[in-house]
Image (cartoon, rainbow, N blue to C red):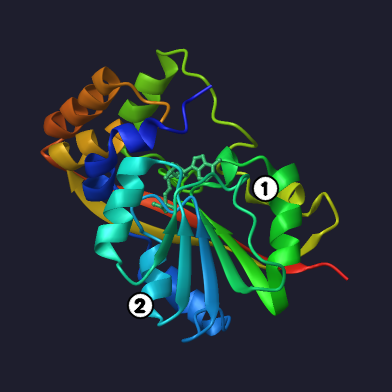
Amino acid sequence: MPDPMHFDRHAALYDRARPPYPDSLRDRLRQLGLLTPGRRALDLGAGSGQATRLLVDAGMDVTAVEPGPALADILQQRFPQVHVVRSTAEEYVPEPGSLDLVTIATAVHWFDLDRVLPSLRQALAPGGRVAVWRTVYGDTSVPPSLFRERVQAIADRRDAPARPGPDETETEAWARLLTAGGLFVVDHREELGWSIVLDADGIQALFTTFSDWSEAEAEQAAEAVRELGGTVVERYVTPLIVLAPAG
Ligand SMILES: C[S@@+](CC[C@H](N)C(=O)[O-])C[C@H]1O[C@@H](n2cnc3c(N)ncnc32)[C@H](O)[C@@H]1O
């Protein structure tokens, strides 16, 4: 099984190499009324703050929970106004009724949902929501680019351990898992497609941050970019699932 502390071991690289979430995500969260100044938000598995930033920029009162010490340090330095808690999502128990929004960005697959979801259900204030999203690196709904064919070939050659939970592309399976306990219902679900141009260094850095890629494999991916002309257009997807309390 991949190691959830992989990100912390590469904290500075993680911070530099992971692309930010697309503007369309921020727009949708706004349209859904989730980014409201003064409201109380909790970002679980915050990393170096890619999702935290959306909450801070919206003027929310933010707590961020991150177990990796190096990532938590980056987070606290970047956002002095955020209450950073060095903890796992399982160990952190927010006050009942104290939260208007919980965000879980590219992190839910690391959580023990049987422990985390009940405490989130209790912590939500009336009208509160849990927004779960991630980046899927590689849009499987479009024909693969030459680079994506090379990435697949690298992946096919190895015997990498699977990440926990359903496959990252299976948004419906994730929605079922998040609502299986009967505590939450799906309030909104969609998949936001976006693209980014990356060079060989960008690909090498990004792939090194993936918990199921070795450094040698990330170098092979970078070599593929060089052979394909030096840059590639990558098409990614951000599935978004917004949960409301059931009943
Ligand atoms: C792929 S990173 C995502 C970070 C950030 N949310 C983002 O969007 O860039 C996954 C994060 O989950 C954190 N994590 C892993 N297991 C966790 C747990 N049990 N509780 C809370 N966070 C966890 C890792 O330390 C890492 O920062």
Can the viewer see residue 210 in this picture?
no
Mark 1, residue position: 174
Q: Nearer the viewer, mark 1 or mark 2?
A: 2
Q: Secondary structure at mark 1?
A: helix
In front of the other: 185 or 38: 38
Near mark 2 (Cα within 10 A), the count class, few <14, some 14-19 or many ≥20, is: few
Q: Going 20% across and 47% down the picture, which residue do you hit?
A: 198
Would the CB of label 1 be found within 8 Å of ligand 1?
no
Q: Which mark is residue 57?
A: 2
Question: Is 176 positioned to the left or the right of 207 in the image?
Answer: right
Taking the spot 31% from the left edge, 59% from the top edge, the residue there is 76
Q: Quadrant of the N terminus?
A: top right
Which of the two residues, 126 or 216, is positioned nearer the viewer here? Answer: 126
Quadrant that contains the C terminus: bottom right
Task: Name the spot of residue 28 as percent of width and height, x first.
Answer: 50, 76
CA distance separating discs 1 and 2 = 28 Å
Q: Is residue 93 above or below residue 227?
A: below
